[in-house]
Amino acid sequence: MIDSTTKNLPRHIAIVMDGNGRWAKKRGLPRAAGHKIGADSVEAVVNTCARLGIQALSLFAFSTENWNRPKDEVSFLMDLLVRFLRDKIKTLHKNNIRFQMIGDRCGLNDLILAEVCAAEELTKNNSGLAMNIAINYSGRWDIANAAKNIAVQAAANLLKPEEICADKFREFTCLANLPDPDLLIRTSGEYRISNFMLWQLAYTELYFTTVTWPDFREKELEQAILEYTKRERRFGMISEQLAAQAK
Ligand code: IPE
Ligand code: IPE
Ligand code: MG
């Protein structure tokens, strides 16, 4: 359907992977079963993005608010993350993928942190797909953290208040080294952002599907990308201006 030569491919795709619990419930399985199969969808979308030559993929795996879930579900999700990294990192590395975690590292247990750091270290010089996993992440945390670090610099006289503008602020947010997401996908028929990348999504194209995450694979991703390629991104301008620019 689409390949790396398709016009207008997104450079950066962000995904709120949702619906694991409902996928499992529908099948009379425990929620954990949905999370487990959901990990296979992660692998599928990573491979598809790599094949299409997409620059970056950011996946929301665990929000700051997800700590409020039942204890056993939280520990299952943390174990799954550790297992995913242990099992898959060598293959990701072989495929030239650069792994990075975004989110608040305070509050994560040592086991996860060790696995995340090892994965980042192993893949840091890779030049292929940038795969970002958001763990203990919230968009408001990202913005507040940026503000805190700006304040630290200002207090140390490294930055003047009058130098702070949107472009400067951006440098202090997560993933400042990558373009903002062009496309945000949310699965499972929920129509909300749930505190994901609030700063970075300012001009992102949104795509919602009722497919639940464990069923979201290559075909579903290609469909979302195809729809994205047909969107007109005006960034405040009018169609005629874009047509003139394209000439
Ligand atoms: C997404 O699926 C996975 C995480 C948020 C970790 P859910 O677990 O939210 O599944 P639903 O929304 O309950 O179906
Ligand atoms: C958002 O999913 C967080 C992740 C996908 C990790 P949730 O299922 O937790 O979102 P809400 O709370 O229903 O909005
Ligand atoms: Mg959910």
Image (cartoon, helix red, strand yellow):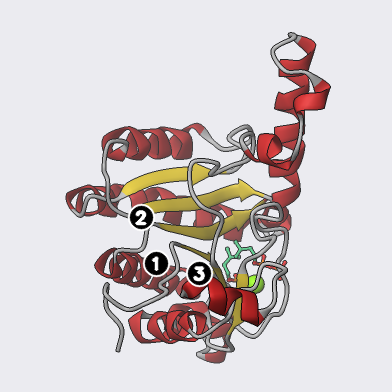
Alpha-carbon distance for marks 1 and 2? 10 Å
| Figure disc tally | 3
Say whether marks 1 and 3 touch (CB < 8 Å): no
Alpha-carbon distance for marks 3 and 2? 14 Å
**Mark in front: 1 vs 2:** 1
Q: Which residue is mark 3?
A: 32
View quadrant of ligand 2? bottom right
On the question of residue 97 being in view, the answer is yes
- The label shown at residue 42 is 1
Badge 3 amino acid: Ala
The answer to which quarter of the image holds residue 11 is bottom left
Dot 3 falls on a residue whose secondary structure is helix
Badge 1 amino acid: Val
Residue 30, position as x, y percentages in the image: 53, 76
Residue 91, position as x, y percentages in the image: 20, 54
- The label shown at residue 84 is 2
Alpha-carbon distance for marks 1 and 3? 15 Å
Residue 114's place in the image compared with 219, above or below, is above
Residue 122, position as x, y percentages in the image: 27, 36
Confirm if mark 2 falls within 8 A of ligand 1: no
Dot 1 falls on a residue whose secondary structure is helix
